[in-house]
Image (spheres, rainbow, N blue to C red):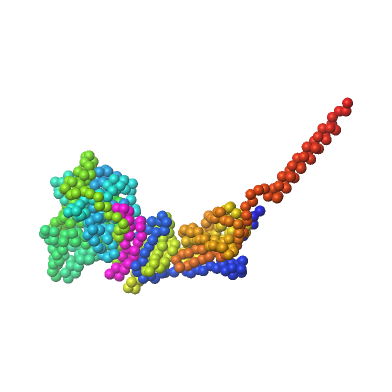
Amino acid sequence: MTRIRKVVAALCTGACLGLAGTTMAARADDHTVETPVRIEPQGDAVLVVDGVRYRGSLEITRSSDGGLDVVNVVDAGDYLRGVAEMPASWPRAALEAQAIVSRTQLAHALAAGRGTAAGRADVAADATGVPPYRGAGSESGEWAAALEATDGLVMRSGGRPADVHTSATSIDDAGSDSGAPLTSWAVSIPAGDLANALEAGGVSLPGGADPTTVRVDAGTVTVGTPAGELRTTTDAFARAVNTGAPASAPDRYPAPAEEQVDAGLTGGDGWGGPWPLPPRPDGDPPRLPLTLPSPHFQVSREGGAFVFAGRGWGSGLGMSKTDARQAADSGRSRDDILGAAFGDLDVGTEAPEGDVSVAIASGAEQVRLGADGGFFRIVGPENRVVAQAAFGQWTATPSGEREVVLTGPDGADVALSVDGFTVPLRVVANRRLPVSFSLSRPAEVTLVVEGPLGTQSETSRHELGILPAGEGDQIGLDDLAPGAYRVSVEATAGDVTASSGWFTVDVAPARNGPSVLGATGLVIVLAVLLVGAVAARSRRRRSSPRV
């Protein structure tokens, strides 16, 4: 019977087989790292930021206001698969028309070199003029099929990707979607709420006073206070209100677009979604998806409040997605839909390729990081590895002028060790060499084999990938030639390394013929059979009657 040696590496010292078997460990305390910091998925893992799944990698930098900017570096195809513009249940013709529009918007943004507040990004997830990006959580089979059916197709103007837009509904009451939700809408906002919303949305009124008048003329909003007047565009005004109203009074106004993660119909061009919203608990009709669903509105005064009466949802430019759905339901093709919305724009092949940098957070006070289905690597400047096999949820918070503090989950400070190392003393050549061990925490593992020992000894390293904590499945090596070998297991997590130490294994030559014991056993068996046959013959003779 083959003997098995089982040694706990944490207890092994230099006396083990006369070799140094050590476990180096360090606590995974908070890591203060200078930016930029890269977060890279390992294997098939998908990164998670504040509960939203993203393919590709992440880059964290410091923003001008002292917060954190997060950029998702993702393949252009994966970016488009993560676009959330239409419900996947809508007709294929409408989805294919939207796929061409979304690809055109991305190609135009990249060709124009459009920047964002994050600085390092090509586009922002909710920027005007680009498709709203919601990461891997918005992927669906029907949307992917629409992208595949229109692979590479973009609309062009003057030989370049066209500047195209979409909106949830038309602002033209006579349009084909005049019966659609939000073709017309109205909302009453008290003067105090409006002042608070604008302030929270980054717009300061003269004197910090409540507004007394609000006028709209040719796309310009003029807000009057006792201390003076403020002028801005209707688009900027609506976006400030949509951001600030739920921040200052979340119980009365809907969340801004970037906080609505449903992959349903969106307003388009950064105007958010989803639609339809569920009924309210009190039985009243669902409230608007945004405080001001579009920049197309007029304002009147009723008592202490301002009433905003508007049309449409979103920018009101380009293709009405509700129009597209109705046209597809009536049998119109994707080309018919695009032609009705954009005229005679040329459709050709000019697919964006390579990686796209998408700003998914700007000026954040804290970011939660993790990975779905695996582990991730945290890398600082000059490719210094901060954590090789990060697991669970981490948080990133700003520190100093250029640094970020990365904090691991509970249990991340467990010292790394390789325990329970098990290896046989002797095996036969060309048979599997079984090796087993356990890790105190997830780590990247390498099996190191040195031998056959002698003047021609070679060292081979077998990467096992990132393994979880606990006792793993037994692993092994095949086809070892006869001789003596040294075997070791190395585990790495960031800048911390642990080793099982070296252990010697003898690999005996395989026997081609029967062993001595096997041949002897065969002789004994034959002898026993012969003796038995002789004895049986003798008994028959004694029992036969004499004549």
Q: Position of residue 400 (x, y in %)?
A: 34, 73
Q: Is residue 465 left or right of residue 182?
A: right
Residue 431 in the magenta stretch? The answer is no
Residue placed furthest toward the left: 217
Residue 306 or residue 51, whichever sits in front: 51
Residue placed furthest toward the front: 455
Residue placed furthest toward the right: 547
Q: Residue at x 75, y 45 (%)?
A: 524
Q: Position of residue 255 (x, y in %)?
A: 27, 57
Q: Is residue 424 left or right of residue 545?
A: left
Magenta-highlighted residues: 55-80
Residue 272 or residue 544, whichever sits in front: 544
Residue placed furthest toward the top: 547
Q: Position of residue 442 (x, y in %)?
A: 47, 61
Instruction: Classify 177 as above or below 110.
Output: above
Q: Residue at x 59, y 64 (%)?
A: 454
Q: Residue at x 40, y 64 (%)?
A: 378
Q: Position of residue 404 (x, y in %)?
A: 36, 69
Instruction: Classify 333 as above or below 202.
Output: above
Residue 197 in view of the camera: no
Image quadrant where residue 403 sits: bottom left
Image quadrant where residue 398 sits: bottom left
Residue 109 or residue 125, whichever sits in front: 109
